[in-house]
Image (spheres, rainbow, N blue to C red):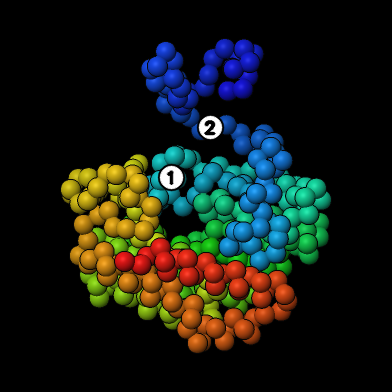
C-alpha cells in the first residue's frame, strides 16, 4: 500500500477498501496466500510498544510484548469452532518457521530487555514444530531469560510435551474451556470432551505450567441447570490447583461466524447494534435471563476468593514478581466484577 501511495506500484492487491470521490470502493476479494516467513519483525519503536509493555494482566515479569507466529488457529475441522471468526478471516492456517520465532525472541531480549512474551496465534503450533521450537529456546538459553505464554487447545499435548514446554521457558497456557456441557461443546464444534479439559489442566499443572481458562456463558440452548455445570467445573479446577487464572465473558455471535448465521436463521438475535457486542450483555435470546447470566459470570470470577485457591496461590509465591502479579490480578478481578454488575 505504501509503495502504491508513493507511485512505485500501480496496482493494489485484492482486499483493499478505499474512498474515491466520496465513493467507497474495493479491489476485490482479499486473499491470504503470502509467505509469512518473508515478513520482517514488527517495528516496535514505530508502534510505540512501551505504551503497552507493563499493564497487561498476562505479564508477570515486565517489560512484556506479543508475537504472532501463526495465522491463526490450526483447529478447523468442519470449519472450526462456530463462534470463532478467525477461521473465516484466515481460510488456511499458516505458520512461520520455528527458527524465525526464536530469532524474534532473541532480538526482543537483546534490543529491548523483554522478559515476557505472549504469542497470540489462535492456537500455538504443536507436534514437531513445537518440539523444534522448544529445543531452540533451550539451546540458545532464551528459556533462562524470558517467560513465554501462548494459546493452546485441550487434548492437543502429552505430559512429555508440557514438560518440554516448561523446560523451554513457557509459563502460562491459555485454554478455551467455553462450557462444561458436552452438548454445548459438540454444538459449537469445539472438538473436545469435558474429560479432556480436566486431564489437560492436570497434566499442564503437573509439568509446572499455569493453565489459564477462558469461559463463556449465555448459550441460548443451555438451561440454568446446564449453565451452572460450567461454574462447578471451574470451581473444581481451581480447588484442585489445576487452573491458575481464568476469565469469563458472555457468548458473542460475531458477524461472519457460523453462530451468527445460525442466530439469523433462527431469528434469535436481540440486536444488531454492534456497540452491544462487547461480551458484557446478552445479544441472543436465551433460556435464562441476562440478570442470571451476569450473576453466573460474577460467581465464576469470585472463585478467585475461594479459600482453597488462595492457599494454592500463597504456596506458589517464589519472588516479588509473584506478589506483584497477584496484586495486579486482584485489581483486574474487581474491574471484571464491576463490568457484570446490574
Residue at 24% x, 47% y is: 271
Q: Which circle marks residue 35 in the picture? A: none
Q: Position of residue 247 (x, y in %)?
A: 46, 66
Which residue lies most toward the left here? 267
Which image quarter holds the N terminus? top right
Which image quarter holds the C terminus? bottom left
Query: How much space separates mark 2 and mark 1, taking CA atoms?
Result: 14 Å
Residue in front for this viewpoint, 62 or 170: 62
Residue 280 vs 233, above or below: the answer is above
Please tell me which of labels 2 and 1 falls first in the chain. 2
Residue 145's quadrant in the figure?
Answer: bottom right
* Residue 107 shown left or right of residue 192 in the figure: right
Element type where label 1 sits in the image: helix
Q: Position of residue 286 (x, y in %)?
A: 22, 61
Query: Callout 2: few (<14), some (14-19), or many (20+) C-alpha neighbours within 10 Å?
Result: few
Element type where label 2 sits in the image: loop
Q: Which circle marks residue 87 in the picture? A: 1
Q: Which residue is mark 2?
A: 33
Residue in front for this viewpoint, 63 or 182: 63
Amino acid at each position: 500500500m505504501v509503495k502504491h501511495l508513493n507511485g512505485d506500484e500501480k496496482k493494489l492487491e485484492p482486499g483493499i477498501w478505499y474512498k474515491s470521490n466520496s465513493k467507497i470502493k474495493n479491489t476485490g476479494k482479499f486473499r491470504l496466500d503470502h509467505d509469512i516467513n518473508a515478513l520482517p519483525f514488527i517495528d516496535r519503536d514505530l508502534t510505540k510498544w512501551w505504551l503497552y509493555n507493563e499493564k497487561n494482566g498476562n505479564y508477570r515479569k515486565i517489560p512484556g510484548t506479543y508475537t504472532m507466529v501463526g495465522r491463526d488457529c490450526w483447529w478447523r475441522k468442519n470449519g472450526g469452532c462456530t463462534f470463532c471468526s478467525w477461521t473465516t478471516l484466515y481460510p488456511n492456517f499458516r505458520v512461520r518457521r520455528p527458527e524465525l520465532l526464536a530469532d524474534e525472541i532473541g532480538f526482543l531480549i537483546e534490543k529491548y530487555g523483554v522478559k515476557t512474551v505472549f504469542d497470540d496465534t489462535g492456537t500455538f503450533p504443536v507436534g514437531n514444530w513445537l518440539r523444534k521450537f522448544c529445543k531452540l529456546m533451550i539451546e540458545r538459553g532464551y528459556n533462562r531469560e524470558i517467560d513465554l505464554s501462548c494459546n493452546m487447545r485441550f487434548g492437543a499435548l502429552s505430559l512429555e510435551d508440557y514438560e518440554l514446554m516448561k523446560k523451554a521457558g513457557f509459563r502460562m497456557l491459555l485454554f478455551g474451556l467455553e462450557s462444561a456441557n458436552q452438548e454445548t461443546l459438540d454444538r459449537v464444534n469445539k472438538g473436545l470432551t469435558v474429560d479432556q479439559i480436566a486431564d489437560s489442566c492436570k497434566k499442564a499443572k503437573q509439568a509446572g505450567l499455569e493453565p489459564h481458562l477462558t469461559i463463556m456463558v449465555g448459550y441460548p440452548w443451555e438451561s440454568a441447570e446446564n449453565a451452572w455445570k460450567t461454574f462447578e467445573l471451574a470451581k473444581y479446577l481451581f480447588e484442585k490447583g489445576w487452573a491458575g487464572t481464568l476469565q469469563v465473558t458472555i457468548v458473542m455471535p460475531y458477524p461472519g461466524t457460523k453462530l451468527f448465521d445460525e442466530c439469523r436463521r433462527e431469528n434469535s438475535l436481540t440486536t444488531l447494534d454492534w456497540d452491544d457486542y462487547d461480551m458484557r450483555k446478552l445479544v441472543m435470546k436465551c433460556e435464562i435471563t441476562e440478570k442470571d447470566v451476569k450473576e453466573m459470570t460474577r460467581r465464576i470470577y469470585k472463585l478467585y476468593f475461594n479459600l482453597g485457591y488462595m492457599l494454592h496461590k500463597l504456596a506458589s509465591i517464589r519472588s516479588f514478581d509473584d506478589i506483584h502479579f497477584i496484586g495486579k490480578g486482584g485489581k483486574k478481578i474487581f474491574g471484571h466484577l464491576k463490568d457484570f454488575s446490574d
